[in-house]
Amino acid sequence: MNWLVLGATEAPLQVSVGGGSSAVKLFLLLTALSFATGALISITSFTRIVIVMSFLRQALGTPQLPPNQVIMALSLALTAFVMAPTFSKVHTEAIGPYLDDQISGKEAYDRGSGPVLQFLLKQTRPDDLRLFYEMSGSERPTRADEVPLTIAVPAFMVSELTTAFRMGLFLFIPLLLVDLFVSAILMSLGLMMVPPTLVSLTLKVGIFLLADGWHLLVQSLVRSFS
């Protein structure tokens, strides 16, 4: 009973909210990480890069080379390179101050969405943005920073698909001409039993390497976001 009496005479217990605040921030960060895959596809350069890489693999006639793991790793590396300036702004203006208890969660969201929105609108075609405004029935804002993410994100994704397929078509056409050229030569020589894909694959890989294709492809992809 003595410890109960002593406890009753002590000063009221004071609970610090610092640890609770840190726990809430940790929980919010882990929750945000659970949506990382969706964010990677919807608001970064990853979609365009991985689609163009897949187009190249099909155009060369090597659907299994490079392996999927290599394509994904290279796409992630290029995405990190392209998105580095945007991510740096988000961390400097929003995430860092929020973790240091300098700004509130809402202010951190407003600050962090600014650089992301700027990147999205820079890569979005006006026609795609107009399409989603017409379907939503909302008025178009006078300033770019007033565009909501609910419209900017789907418009950006449609634009990325269009751009990626266009770049893939530019890859396919010259390599398709190689296939047609090889098929015509083999037909004219009467070599019906020789698989055209065997000859054209060798020529396409050789031409791709002689042209330093990987260097040109990566350069074109990165510069397409500038």
Image (tube, rainbow, N blue to C red):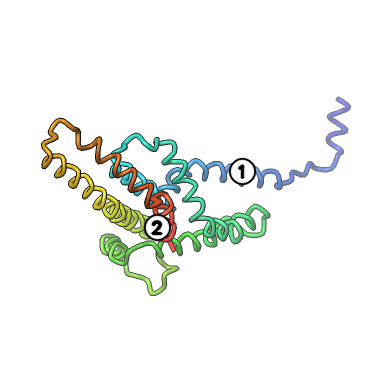
Residue name at image x 48 percent, y 44 percent: 36
35 or 164, nearer to the observer: 164
Which of the image's four quarters has the N terminus?
A: top right
Q: What x and y, as percent, mark residue 108?
A: 57, 58
Q: Position of residue 66 (x, y in %)?
A: 39, 38
Which residue, given by chain and number where applicable, does mark 2 sit on?
220
Asked where in the image residue 87 lies, by quadrant, the reply is bottom right
145 or 25: nearer the eye? 145
Residue at 71% x, 47% y: name it.
Answer: 18
Q: Residues within 10 Å of mark 1 (few under 14, many from 20)?
A: few
Quadrant occupied by the C terminus? bottom left
Q: Residue furthest top?
A: 1
- Height in image: 197 above or below 215? above
Residue 28 vs residue 157, the one in the foreground? 157
Residue under the image location 26 percent in, 64 percent down:
134
Closer mark to the observer between disc 1 and disc 2:
2
Question: What kind of element bears circle 1?
Answer: helix
Left or right of 70 on screen, residue 136: left
Mark 1 and mark 2 lie on one chain; the one further toward the N terminus is 1
Q: Is residue 43 above or below residue 129?
A: above
**Marks 1,2: beta carbons within 8 A:** no
Amino acid type shown at disc 2: Ser
Q: How many marks?
A: 2
Q: Nearer the viewer, residue 157 or 164?
A: 164
Q: Calculate the distance from the C-alpha at mark 1 to the C-alpha at mark 2.
A: 39 Å
Q: Does residue 141 appear to the left or right of 192 in the view shown?
A: right
Say which residue label 1 marks: 26
Q: Residue at x 43, y 41 (%)?
A: 72
